[in-house]
Image (spheres, rainbow, N blue to C red):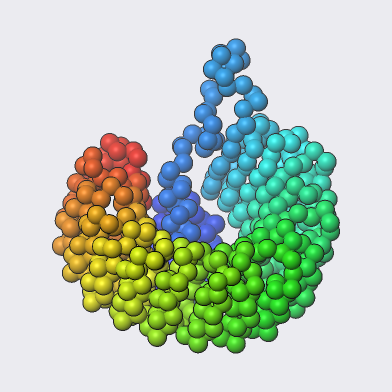
């Protein structure tokens, strides 16, 4: 396992360098990898985010500002600009990632920012000096509603500059992202002032900063101010302990507007989670999202979480991944999930020490809860027997599940017949993640029967690291060319070789293929095939090949 984690991080490093993006995510992953367990957690947590970031990066325009509005040549006369309807009053989105800022480039962007509604500059090597300029932008641009500065070394001094702008009466910012910005508890005093003074601010994302319990207590004081209308609070990786719960519960009692609370990756423990759940039940807030991944939860606190599910019909998104709740804990959760008052839509249970024994409860849940649209069971030892039980539920017309994540669940070719049978009857399932299971070419052949069925509406299929070879690529190519609903396919970490990649490319070229994203990480092919892939992207620009 240690060797596998090291290889993964090495691949992640070179992928980040090759694309010149997602380096902030890479740093975050490396920062978390102090030992084998944290390296595994980094792989499970950050690889999906990295893949999404890379996909999004390749979809962006390559113009200087990467703006969504059309770029205007600086030499274009003002009269002609007005004739085209492109005056200076047009509001634009500035969206930049992983770009080093030299003085001339920064000066150019500052001019653009004066008319932007959204500014996103993740991982752009910004510092506190840049925040002084951004303070001026906030002061002079009342239309600015979103500021996203993740993965920049702003520090407490930088946030102090930003908050001077945020405290001006003309500011109408709604969303503020400061994740992984080297902040400490000192920043919380300034941010508290903003929460007290700016009712327009509805989202605050300050995860991955060493705020500590002391700092977040100060933020909770700001939340209790009547002027604060915060709806989303993200506090992942903030070095919180069980002592924070009293302050959080006090804030929850006074803040009925709060809709989303993320406390993942903090060492809370069962007793603190029990207290938090009691606070949620007693409060008037209509929480819609609660994330408690890697918070030291066991089955001991699952009954209290279940009580929240019974009493809060507003709760639609629950994540308790990377907690050792086991089958016993899941059975307790299901008591709340099965309650008629529960309206859960998204349930993440990755790496929860679940086995095939829990799949009977999960199957009943899938059948009984028509609101449930997405469930993640990544890295649980479900095995083929567990998957077969889940498929029995998926075959039932009452199932409304749209996304099923069963990556790294100990599956083999033997479960593919049950999956294929479910696909022939299930019209609702849109996303199926089966990567890192030993399905093999034979498994793909069996799955193809269900995937090709007219009832199957799969849009996103993930088969990375499934022991596939060129031998199954003709079948995959046939699926791609025949099923117009399929828009995303991941075949990463499979030794497909030149022969397999060429078969896949042949299918992409066909007009009947509607694929939008083809993900091919860590697959080796020749220079000739590399040229063919580049030519394919040029001839069919709507298809993004991520490699």
Q: Quadrant of residue 91?
A: top right
Q: Residue at x 66, y 60 (%)?
A: 259
> Taking 61 as reference, is 161 above or below it?
below
> Taking 214 as reference, is 161 above or below it?
above
Q: How many marks?
A: 0
Q: Residue at x 25, y 50 (%)?
A: 483
In front here: 164 or 365?
A: 365
Q: Quadrant of the N terminus?
A: bottom left
Q: Quadrant of residue 410?
A: bottom left
Residue at the farthest top position: 79
* Spot occupied by residue 465 in the image (x, y as percentages of width and height): 31, 67
Q: Quadrant of residue 136?
A: top right
In front here: 129 or 508?
A: 508
Left or right: 81, with 58 as reference point? right
* Spot occupied by residue 277 in the image (x, y as percentages of width and height): 67, 76
* Spot occupied by residue 154 in the image (x, y as percentages of width and height): 69, 53
């Amino acid at each position: 396992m240690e060797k596998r984690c090291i290889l993964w991080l090495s691949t992640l490093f070179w992928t980040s360098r090759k694309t010149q993006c997602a380096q902030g995510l890479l740093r975050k992953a490396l920062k978390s990898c102090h030992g084998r367990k944290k390296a595994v957690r980094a792989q499970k947590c950050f690889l999906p985010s990295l893949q999404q970031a890379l996909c999004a990066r390749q979809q962006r325009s390559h113009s200087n500002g990467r703006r969504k509005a059309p770029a205007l040549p600086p030499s274009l006369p003002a009269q002609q600009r007005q004739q085209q309807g492109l005056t200076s009053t047009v509001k634009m989105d500035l969206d930049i990632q992983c770009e080093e800022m030299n003085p001339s480039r920064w000066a150019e962007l500052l001019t653009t920012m004066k008319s932007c509604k959204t500014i996103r500059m993740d991982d752009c090597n910004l510092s506190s000096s840049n925040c002084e300029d951004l303070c001026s932008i906030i002061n002079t641009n009342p239309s600015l509603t979103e500021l996203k500065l993740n993965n920049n070394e702003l520090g407490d001094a930088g946030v102090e500059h930003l908050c001077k702008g945020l405290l001006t009466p003309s500011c109408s910012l709604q969303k503020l992202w400061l994740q992984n910005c080297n902040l400490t508890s000192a920043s919380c005093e300034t941010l508290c002032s903003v929460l007290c003074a700016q009712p327009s601010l509805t989202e605050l994302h300050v995860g991955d900063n060493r705020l500590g319990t002391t700092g977040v207590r100060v933020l909770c004081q700001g939340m209790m101010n009547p002027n604060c209308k915060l709806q989303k609070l993200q506090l992942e990786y903030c070095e919180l302990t069980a002592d924070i719960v009293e302050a959080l519960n006090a804030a929850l009692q006074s803040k009925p507007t709060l809709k989303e609370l993320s406390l993942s990756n903090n060492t809370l423990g069962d007793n603190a989670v029990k207290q938090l759940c009691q606070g949620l039940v007693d409060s008037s807030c209509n929480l819609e999202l609660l994330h408690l991944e890697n918070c030291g939860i066991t089955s001991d606190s699952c009954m209290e979480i279940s009580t929240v599910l019974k009493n809060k019909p507003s709760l639609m998104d629950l994540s308790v991944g990377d907690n050792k709740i086991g089958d016993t804990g899941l059975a307790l959760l299901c008591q709340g999930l099965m309650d008629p008052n529960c309206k859960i839509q998204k349930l993440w249970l990755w790496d929860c020490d679940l086995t095939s024994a829990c799949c009977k409860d999960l199957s009943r849940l899938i059948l009984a809860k028509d609101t449930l649209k997405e469930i993640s069971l990544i890295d649980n030892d479900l095995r083929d027997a567990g998957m077969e039980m889940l498929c029995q539920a998926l075959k039932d017309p009452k199932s409304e599940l749209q996304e099923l994540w069963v990556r790294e669940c100990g599956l083999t070719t033997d479960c593919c017949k049950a999956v294929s049978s479910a696909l022939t009857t299930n019209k609702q399932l849109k996303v199926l993640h089966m990567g890192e299971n030993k399905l093999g070419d034979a498994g793909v052949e069996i799955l193809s029967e269900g995937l090709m069925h007219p009832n199957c509406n799969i849009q996103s299929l993930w088969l990375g690291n499934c022991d596939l070879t060129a031998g199954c690529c003709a079948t995959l190519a046939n699926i791609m060319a025949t099923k117009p609903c399929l828009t995303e396919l991941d075949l990463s970490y499979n030794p497909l070789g030149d022969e397999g990649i060429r078969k896949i490319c042949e299918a992409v070229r066909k007009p009947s293929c509607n694929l939008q994203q083809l993900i091919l990480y860590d697959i080796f092919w020749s220079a000739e095939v590399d040229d063919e892939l580049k030519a394919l992207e040029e001839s069919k620009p709507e298809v993004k090949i991520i490699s």
